[in-house]
Image: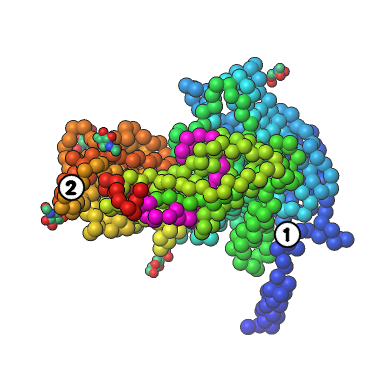
C-alpha cells in the first residue's frame, strides 16, 4: 500500500474513532446549537402563497391558505418530500366520504382561511381552515376543518393535528377514511422500518408497475425490480399493517445523507376502533401514513355513518413527524433506535401541553378512572380470579363490545397488571362505558354504568367482576380465546410468492401473501376433520375456513368436522352449550349442525356476516364475533358425535372466517362446589 493510501486509512480510522468516542448524545445530536450555545428560536416567514416555519433544525413549507406541506428541508436535503409530485401531492390530509347512496369521493381538506395562532421564539402554530355551509351542497364533505401545524424550538420535526366538526342538522354522510399522507423522495428513501422485526430494503414504485399484479392490485410479484435481490418477492402494503396499540413509530431511512423520517403517534385516543384495529403504516412510494380511521380490517361494520344531524367534533392528533440524522459512518439502523427513543419522549409528554386549540385539553382538564377487574367463572375457579393483563378501556356508550366498531368517539385503553389493577389517565371529559377483554377468557366485558368524566375527576371503581359466557363444564375446547387465529395452523406460503422479511419469523408468518390458497392444497378432496383429544390445534386446525378452489375460478363451500366422544354412562338431561368466538368474518355464513351433516336446517346459522377482509389482507384477525349456541341434549348421543361447521358462502376465494376459540360445555352442574 502506498503512503498516501496508508495515511488516508489512518485518517479514516481516526475519524471513526472520533465519532465513536464523541458518540453524541441523542439530544445534542438533534439540537442544532447556535453560536452562543442556545438552540435557535422558531421563525415564520410569510410569503404570498406559502408559509415557512424554521427552527434551525427543520424548515417546513406550507401552501397557503390550502395548508398542504409542500417542502421539508432537513440536514442538507433541500426537500425530503418527492419534488416530482405536484405540491398538493406531497404532504396532505384527506378523507374518503360519500353522501348516502352516492359514490365515494376524496376530499383533500384544502384550507380557505389562514391564521397564525401563535408566533414566538419558542413556538409557531398555524391554522388552515375550511368551513362548510349549505351552499356547498354535496360538492365537498360536510365538515368544518381546522388543520394545525406546530413547530417548536429545538424540536426536530413538526406536529400535525386537525379539528373536524359537523354542526347540528348537517346532511348525513359516511366517512370511511381520515388520514395524513407523506410521499418521500423516491431516490433517497429505500429502507423502511415498522418495528424491531419488520424493517427492510423496499422495492421502488416502478418495480410494482413492471411487476405482475396478483389476486388484487395491491399485491404485486416483483419480476424485474431495480434492486435484483428483491426479484421474485411479493410486495403488498398490507404486509406492513399494524394494530393501533403497536403503531407508535414507523418510517423510512435515506442512506445518503443518512436521514430518517418518522411518523410518531403518542396516543390512540383519537384513532378509530380501539387498540386492536389494524391499519396501514408505511409502504412503497416511499409513503408514510397516519391513519385515523379506515374500513381496513373492519369493513363497514365499523360505524362510519354520520346520521340524523347529530353534531360531532373530534380532534385528530397531534402526531409528530420526526426527522433524525447521523454521519454516514454510523450504522443507519441507529436512526430507528433513536426514533424509538423519541417516541418514548412523545408518549411520556402525552397529552401535550402546547397545542393552542381549546379543543385539545391538557392534562389538568382530563380525568382518571381506576379499579381492579376480576373474572368470575366458577367452572375455572371457586373464587374470582385476577383478570391478568386485561385490556380495559373507555369508549362511547354502547353495547357489549361496541368499542371495536366505533369510529366516532375517543377511546382510552390500558392493559391491567397481573392482578387486574388498571389506571386510565388523561381521559377527556365526556360520557363513556368501561369495556374490557381478558386474554385467555372468552367474550367481551362491559361495565353497565355510564361513567361521566369531568376535568380533574378521579373515579375509583373498586373491584369489578367480569362473568364471561359460561353455562356448564368444559368438555373440550379448541384454540386460545384471545381474539386472533394466531395459535392455529398458519402454513408456509408458496416459495414463489414470498416476502423474505417474514421467512423464519414465526410471529409474522401470517403476513405472507396467498396463505388462503394453501387450504385447497392441504385438503384437496376432503375438508378438515378435528378429533378432540387426538388432534392438536396448532397443527390440525387451519387458520381460516375458506372455500376450496375447484379450478377454473370456481369455489366450493367447506364443512369442517369436530369429532368428540361423550362418555357419560347416564346421559345428562339439560342443555349443552357451544361457545363460538370468531376472530374475523368476510362475506361469510357459519352454519352449525350436530351429527347430521345433511340436515336441511342447520341448528344454528350466523347468516351473512362480515366485511373485514382480514384473510386477503394478511391480518390474523378482523372484528370479533361471539355466539353462545344452545344445544339441547337430544342433539347429542352417548359415544361418538360430530359437529359440522359449514361456511356456506363461496363466491370469493378470500371470503371466509377465522375462528378465535370454540368450546363445548356440558349441561350445568348442580352440586356443592358450584352454585
Ligand atoms: C357559504 O359558503 C360560501 C362559499 O364558500 C360563502 O361565499 C358564503 O359566505 C358562506 N355563507 C355563510 C352563511 O357562511
Ligand atoms: C431461514 O432459516 C434457515 C434455517 O435456519 C436458513 O438456512 C435460511 O437461510 C433462513 N432464511 C432467511 C431468509 O433468513
Ligand atoms: C371454465 O369455465 C368456462 C366458463 O364457465 C367454461 O366455458 C369452460 O368450459 C370451463 N373450463 C373447464 C376446463 O372446465
Ligand atoms: C334448553 O333447550 C330448549 C330447547 O331449545 C329450550 O327451550 C330451553 O329453554 C333450554 N333450557 C335452558 C335452561 O336454556
Ligand atoms: C368412536 O370413534 C373412534 C375413532 O374416532 C373409534 O375408535 C371408536 O370405536 C368409536 N366409538 C364408537 C362407540 O363408535
Read off the residue under disc 2: 571
Question: Is residue 379 in the magenta section?
Answer: yes
Residue drawn at 24 percent across, 42 percent down: 574
Q: Is mark 2 within 8 Å of ligand 5?
A: no
* Comes first in the chain, label 1 or label 2: 1
Residue drawn at 42 percent across, 39 percent down: 612
Residue 250 lies, with reference to residue 558, above or below; the image says below
Q: Position of residue 48 (x, y in %)?
A: 79, 33
Element marked by disc 1: helix
Q: Is residue 250 left or right of residue 240?
A: right
Q: Which image quarter: residue 148?
A: top right
> Disc 1 versus disc 2: distance between alpha carbons?
73 Å
User: Which residues are the magenta region?
Assistant: 378-402
Question: Is residue 317 in the magenta section?
Answer: no
Residue drawn at 54 percent across, 27 percent down: 306
Q: Is residue 555 visible?
A: no
Mark 1 crowd level (few <14, some 14–19, many ≥20, 10 Å Cα): some
Q: Position of residue 386 (x, y in %)?
A: 48, 55
**Mark number for residue 30?**
1
Q: Is residue 373 visible?
A: yes
Residue 275 lies, with reference to residue 133, above or below; the image says below
Residue at the extreme top of the image, as rendered: 135
Q: Which image quarter: residue 536?
A: bottom left
Element marked by disc 2: loop
Q: Is residue 488 left or right of residue 204?
A: left
Q: Position of residue 460 (x, y in %)?
A: 61, 47
Q: Nearer the viewer, residue 137 or 307?
A: 307
Residue drawn at 70 percent across, 36 percent down: 359
Q: How many marks?
A: 2
Amino acid at each position: 500500500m502506498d503512503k498516501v493510501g496508508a495515511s488516508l486509512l489512518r485518517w479514516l480510522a481516526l475519524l471513526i474513532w472520533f465519532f465513536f468516542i464523541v458518540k453524541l448524545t441523542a439530544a445534542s445530536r438533534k439540537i442544532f446549537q447556535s453560536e452562543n450555545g442556545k438552540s435557535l428560536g422558531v421563525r415564520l416567514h410569510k410569503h404570498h402563497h406559502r408559509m415557512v416555519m424554521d427552527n434551525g433544525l427543520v424548515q417546513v413549507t406550507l401552501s397557503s391558505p390550502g395548508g398542504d406541506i409542500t417542502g421539508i428541508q432537513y440536514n442538507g436535503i433541500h426537500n425530503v418530500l418527492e419534488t416530482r409530485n405536484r405540491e398538493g401531492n406531497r404532504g396532505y390530509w384527506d378523507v374518503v366520504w360519500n353522501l348516502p347512496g352516492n359514490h365515494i369521493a376524496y376530499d383533500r381538506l384544502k384550507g380557505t382561511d389562514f391564521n397564525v395562532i401563535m408566533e414566538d421564539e419558542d413556538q409557531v402554530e398555524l391554522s388552515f381552515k375550511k368551513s362548510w355551509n349549505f351552499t356547498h351542497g354535496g360538492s365537498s364533505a360536510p365538515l368544518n376543518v381546522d388543520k394545525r401545524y406546530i413547530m417548536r424550538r429545538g424540536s426536530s420535526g413538526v406536529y400535525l393535528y386537525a379539528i373536524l366538526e359537523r354542526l347540528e342538522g348537517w346532511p348525513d354522510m359516511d366517512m370511511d377514511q381520515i388520514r395524513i399522507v407523506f410521499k418521500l423522495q423516491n431516490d433517497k428513501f429505500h429502507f423502511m422500518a415498522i418495528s424491531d422485526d419488520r424493517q427492510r430494503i423496499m422495492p421502488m414504485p416502478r418495480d410494482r408497475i413492471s411487476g405482475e399484479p396478483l389476486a388484487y392490485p395491491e399485491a404485486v410479484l416483483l419480476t424485474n425490480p431495480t434492486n435484483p435481490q428483491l426479484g421474485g418477492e411479493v410486495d403488498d402494503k398490507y404486509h406492513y399493517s399494524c394494530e393501533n396499540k403497536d403503531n407508535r413509530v414507523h418510517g423510512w431511512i435515506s442512506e445518503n445523507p443518512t436521514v430518517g423520517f418518522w411518523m410518531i403517534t403518542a396516543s390512540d385516543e383519537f384513532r378509530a376502533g380501539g387498540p386492536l384495529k389494524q391499519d396501514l403504516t408505511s409502504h412503497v412510494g416511499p409513503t408514510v401514513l397516519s391513519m385515523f380511521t379506515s374500513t381496513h380490517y373492519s369493513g363497514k361494520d365499523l360505524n362510519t355513518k354520520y346520521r340524523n344531524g347529530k353534531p360531532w367534533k373530534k380532534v385528530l392528533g397531534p402526531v409528530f413527524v420526526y426527522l433524525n440524522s447521523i454521519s454516514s459512518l454510523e450504522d443507519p439502523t441507529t436512526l430507528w433506535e433513536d426514533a424509538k427513543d423519541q417516541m418514548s419522549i412523545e408518549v411520556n409528554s402525552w397529552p401535550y401541553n402546547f397545542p393552542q386549540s381549546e379543543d385539545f385539553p391538557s392534562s389538568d382538564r382530563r380525568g382518571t378512572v381506576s379499579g381492579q377487574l376480576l373474572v368470575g367463572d366458577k367452572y375455572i375457579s371457586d373464587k374470582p380470579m385476577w383478570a391478568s393483563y386485561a385490556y380495559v378501556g373507555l369508549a362511547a356508550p354502547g353495547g357489549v363490545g361496541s368499542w371495536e366498531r366505533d369510529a366516532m368517539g375517543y377511546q382510552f385503553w390500558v392493559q391491567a397488571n397481573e392482578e387486574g389493577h388498571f389506571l386510565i389517565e388523561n381521559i377527556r371529559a365526556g360520557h363513556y362505558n368501561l369495556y374490557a377483554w381478558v386474554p385467555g377468557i372468552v367474550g367481551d366485558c362491559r361495565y353497565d354504568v355510564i361513567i361521566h368524566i369531568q376535568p380533574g375527576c378521579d373515579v375509583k371503581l373498586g373491584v369489578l367482576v367480569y362473568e364471561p359466557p359460561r353455562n356448564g363444564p368444559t368438555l373440550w375446547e379448541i384454540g386460545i380465546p384471545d381474539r386472533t387465529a394466531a395459535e392455529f395452523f398458519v402454513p408456509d406460503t408458496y416459495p414463489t410468492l414470498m416476502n423474505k422479511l417474514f421467512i423464519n419469523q414465526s410471529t409474522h408468518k401470517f403476513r405472507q401473501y396467498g396463505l388462503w390458497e394453501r387450504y385447497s392444497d392441504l385438503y384437496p378432496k376432503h375438508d378438515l376433520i378435528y378429533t378432540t383429544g387426538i388432534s392438536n390445534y396448532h397443527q390440525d386446525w387451519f387458520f381460516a375456513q375458506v372455500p376450496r378452489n375447484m379450478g377454473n375460478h370456481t369455489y366450493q363451500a367447506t364443512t369442517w368436522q369436530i369429532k368428540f366422544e361423550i362418555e357419560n354412562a347416564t346421559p345428562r338431561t339439560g342443555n349443552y352449550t357451544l361457545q363460538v368466538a370468531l376472530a374475523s368474518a368476510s362475506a361469510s355464513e357459519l352454519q352449525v349442525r350436530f351429527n347430521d351433516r345433511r340436515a336441511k336446517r342447520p341448528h344454528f346459522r350466523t347468516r351473512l356476516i362480515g366485511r373485514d377482509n382480514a384473510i386477503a389482507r394478511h391480518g390474523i384477525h378482523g372484528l370479533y364475533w361471539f355466539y353462545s349456541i344452545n344445544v339441547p341434549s337430544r342433539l347429542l348421543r352417548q359415544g361418538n358425535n360430530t359437529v359440522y361447521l359449514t361456511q356456506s358462502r363461496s363466491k370469493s376465494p378470500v371470503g371466509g372466517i377465522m375462528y378465535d376459540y370454540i368450546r363445548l360445555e356440558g349441561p350445568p352442574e348442580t352440586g356443592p362446589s358450584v352454585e
